[in-house]
Amino acid sequence: MIPPEVKQTTSRVSRAQRWNHFLARLGVKRMGHRVEPGLYALGEPGPDSPVLVTANYTLSFDALRSSLNGTDAYLLVLDTDGINVWCAAGKGTFGTDELVSRIETTRLASIVSQRRLILPQLGAAGVSAHEVHERSGFTVEFGPVRAADLPEYLRTGRATPEMRRVRFGLLDRLVLIPVELKHALLPTVVGAVVLYLLAGGLAAAGIAASVLAGIVAFPILLPWLPLREFSAKGFVLGAVAAAPFALVLTRTGGGPHDLRALVWAAAYALVAVPITAYLALNFTGATPFTSRSGVRREIFRYVPVMATMAGGGILLAAVLTVLALLGAK
């Protein structure tokens, strides 16, 4: 019999919950897509039923329960502040202390007789398995990367190499684009308007293209862009995206060799290229291809370069604007 303090759930995801997923993908109420932490019963679990651990982010919780149709299990939901397992493990909220605390507060040891917890593989960075065992008596077992593989994993008791393989295919990358577009929309519009007033529509369109290159083209082209570091890949992509606009800007003055036109083109490129590179660097937080130490190295190595380039481009544009105003007088 399921204890009354255990919450009940099902493997069915309702239309309202799917709408919640859609809003989460768009970044609407980004930190509001969460379920209450605690212990949930899926189906009719008993003392020997498996206990699977997840985050209280709705997409993580719903992906787990929907993959277990027909399975009787307990779902132990940690308080990760509404952040998914992988990101929460990096931040420390999907971690040893929270797991041990949740075992205690839910009185899990009195509800199940077995002492095995199945955690998602991508949560391993935040959890010390031996410490959990020492403090709670429960053994931590890391299951497959994807929830869809859990039924076979529970049936066989082992994860195949394919289950352990972290994939980050095109679809995984595409679903990240809408939320990034939403966050960049307002600053992009403001920047484009300012540039339109200062330098005309071509420069404004060029900056918008640089933003789209970093947010849309970069995740799509990620595996095929040259170089290893995301920032370096971003500089390459940014240069490619900016080149046509810079070339046209060089020919908008008195001729193809007009000095002021060349300087305007240089100013534009100095601002546009690091925008794409910065957005590419920002993408490191959304991919399993990176590590915290690697991202830290990229930040210290490339952000000063980006800031210097953008600052130089803005200074050049300001000087040209002042000269144009003085010339008009």
Image (spheres, helix red, strand yellow):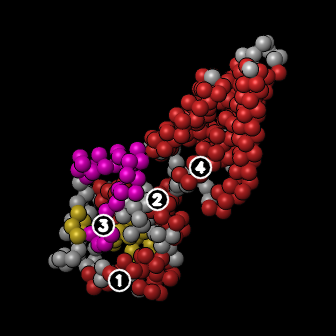
Which of the two discs, 2 and 1, labels the residue nearer the N terminus?
1
Q: Where's residue 83, x and y in %? A: 43, 60
Instruction: Tell me the number on the disc at residue 36.
Output: 3
Q: CA distance from mark 1 to mark 4?
A: 37 Å
Q: CA distance from mark 2 to mark 3?
A: 23 Å
Above or below, 46 relative to 110: above
Tag 3–tag 1 contact (CB < 8 Å): no
Residue 139 visible to an observer of this rendering: no
Q: Where's residue 216, x and y in %? A: 54, 36
Image check: 49 left or right of 159?
A: left
Q: Which residue is mark 2?
A: 145
Secondary structure beneath dot 2 equals loop
Residue at 45% over, 86% down: 135
Which of the two discs, 3 and 4, labels the residue nearer the N terminus?
3
Q: Which residue is mark 1?
A: 104
Q: CA distance from mark 3 to mark 4?
A: 30 Å
Q: CA distance from mark 4 to mark 2?
A: 23 Å
Please identify the quarter of the rendering in which residue 239 is found: top right
Tag 3–tag 4 contact (CB < 8 Å): no
> Residue 70 or 120: which is nearer the viewer?
120
Which of the two discs, 1 and 4, labels the residue nearer the N terminus?
1
> Residue 301 or 321: which is nearer the viewer?
321
Q: Which residue is mark 4?
A: 282
Q: Nearer the viewer, mark 3 or mark 1?
A: 3
Residue at 54% over, 40% down: 187
Q: Which amino acid type corresponds to the residue marked 2 in the rendered image?
A: Val
Magenta segment range?
Answer: 13-40
Q: Which amino acid type corresponds to the residue marked 4 in the rendered image?
A: Asn
- Mark 4 nearby-residue class (10 Å; few <14, some 14–19, many ≥20): some
- Mark 1 nearby-residue class (10 Å; few <14, some 14–19, many ≥20): few
Image check: 217 left or right of 248?
A: left
Q: Nearer the viewer, mark 2 or mark 3?
A: 3
